[in-house]
Image: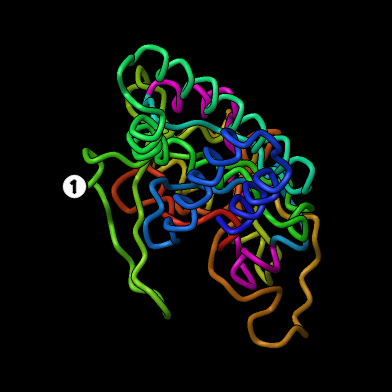
Amino acid sequence: MNLFRAAVHKALLDEHDQDLRAFRSKIYEGLEQSGQASVEFFVACMSERDDDLSQWRAYGGGEGGISIGFDPRRVLESCAAAGGRGLFPVLHKQHEHGLLVDQIFNGTVAFYRRGLERRPGISSEQWRSAFLAAWRGMIIPFAAFMKHDAFESEHEWRIVKWYGSTDLPSLRFRQRQTLLSRHLPLSLCSPDQKPARLPIKSVIVGPSRHKAVTLVSVGTLLQQQGYDLNTIELKESRVPFKPSEPRGGLGSRSLRQRRVGARKTRSGGVDDGGPCRVTTSARAAGSR
């Protein structure tokens, strides 16, 4: 969210038209009032890299992590069928952030002006207040498309799910070390697929002392859940494991690495509610 606000602020400073400057200023004020505690979207983070040392270290739990590859076409189909969410690449470069904000502003201004023209008798200030109150929730989720350039090597994609009041009964909560976090189970299954199965294309067992044993167990688990092993590639990570690493091994954080087919995924976690659900976190862009 901070990166998004910074890009909006830069665009505000570069604006010379006084009316548009006032309009952009109101947008920026609205974003300033929207802290991390009030984010209105959920994200599931993924990566194009399926077997990357830096991500095993950061997200693979130190030893014994698993990388699950999804079929990107079927992931997109599930997003389209569910509505209110999509799969997007994360932008890391500052000029990309600026281009995205410019596109958002241009679309917002055009929509605002059309609405004002269709409402004779309403002052621009009245319409601006009403417009921004409703439009803010549509703008803020774009913050999920931005991330600091220090993370560019992750080649990240995100499923962004707009939060609605009907999602409230499905929310789940986890007590973490420093906060209570919200999570929303999402299905990645095709709506016409019976029985429901995650669109898994491959599984890689991460660096560990017993990769071969784990690989056999992964295959057995998939069979138990009804997956056809003839359609899923199972293999060990090419990254060697160093048993001399201090406790925690390659990393600390027990998030399992994932991937989307040729474009691989990361983060989330298969939910205990069944074989076809993914738990995502409500968080501002750039946070972990």
The quadrant the C terminus occupies is bottom right
Left or right, residue 100 beside residue 190? right
- Where is residue 193 shown, x and y percent of the image? 37, 21
Query: Of helix, strand and loop, which one carries label 1?
Result: helix
Three-letter amino acid code of the residue under disc 1: Pro
Q: Residue at x 68, y 43 (%)?
A: 11
Quarter occupied by residue 66: bottom right
Q: Nearer the viewer, residue 167 or 268?
A: 167
In the displayed structure, 113 sits above or below 138; it is above
Q: Nearer the viewer, residue 173 or 221?
A: 173
Range covered by the magenta-colored residues: 56-81
Residue where numbered disc 1 is placed:
169
| Residue 73 forms part of the magenta stretch | yes
User: Few, some or many C-alpha atoms within 10 Å of disc 1 (few <14, some 14-19, many ≥20)?
Assistant: few
| Residue 39 position (above or below residue 246) | above
Residue 160 x, y percent position in the rendering: 49, 40
Front residue of this view, candidates 209 and 99: 99
- The N terminus - image quarter: bottom right
Position of 197 relative to 267 (above/below): above
